[in-house]
Image (cartoon, rainbow, N blue to C red):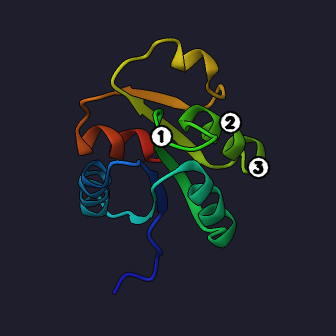
Amino acid sequence: MNATSKSVILVVDDDALVRVHSNFALEDAGYEVVEASNAADALVKLKERPDIAALFTDVRMPGDLDGIDLANAVHAQRPDIAIVVTSGTDNGTTAALPAAAQFVQKPYTGAQISRLLRP
């Protein structure tokens, strides 16, 4: 077994099928995946898992915070975390994201996400 640990990615999407698809693609690329179904759950997971190295989140989610709010909150708490945000449309999304965050429009491939999250 390899002595190096896998990079941990927090995947946040309220659509379970999309989350599973993203998880499989990222696990196939060698990442460990932690799941959350909304921004509030994601912030809890972030506190529980200091080893999270990246965030991959959808923009539209139920609850008080959407993916843009989550990206900004994560960046404020942990500026070391790579952030990739996805949505079906841009609609000014990129302007509201932290400067270091990246945006990928749906539909995306697992290879695209893996490439964007690579350190």
Task: Give the quarter of the image for residue 105.
Answer: top left
Q: 17 and 77: which one is in front?
A: 17
Under mark 1, the amino acid is Met
Residue at point 46%, 12% (across, down): 91
Name the quadrant of the N terminus. bottom left
Looking at the image, residue 15 lies above or below residue 7: above
> Which of the two labelled residues, at mark 2 and mark 3, occupies the earlier sequence position?
2
Between the C-alphas of marks 1 and 2, the distance is 15 Å
Which label lies toward us, 1 or 3?
1
Tell me whether the residue at label 1 lies in contact with that at label 2, contact meaning CB atoms closer than 8 angstroms.
Answer: no
Residue at point 43%, 47% (across, down): 118
Residue lying farthest to the front in this orientation: 63
Place of residue 14 in the rendered image (x, y in percent of width and height, measured from the top left):
40, 49
110 vs 6, left or right, is left
Element assignment for label 1: loop
Element assignment for label 2: helix
Looking at the image, residue 63 lies above or below residue 96: below
> Which of the two labelled residues, at mark 1 and mark 2, occupies the earlier sequence position?
1
Tell me whether the residue at label 1 lies in contact with that at label 3, contact meaning CB atoms closer than 8 angstroms.
Answer: no
| Residue 72: image tag | 2
Q: Which residue is mark 1?
A: 61
Between the C-alphas of marks 1 and 3, the distance is 20 Å
Q: 102 and 4: which one is in front?
A: 102
Under mark 2, the amino acid is Asn
Element assignment for label 3: helix
Q: Which residue is mark 3?
A: 77
> Which of the two labelled residues, at mark 1 and mark 3, occupies the earlier sequence position?
1
Which label lies toward us, 1 or 2?
1
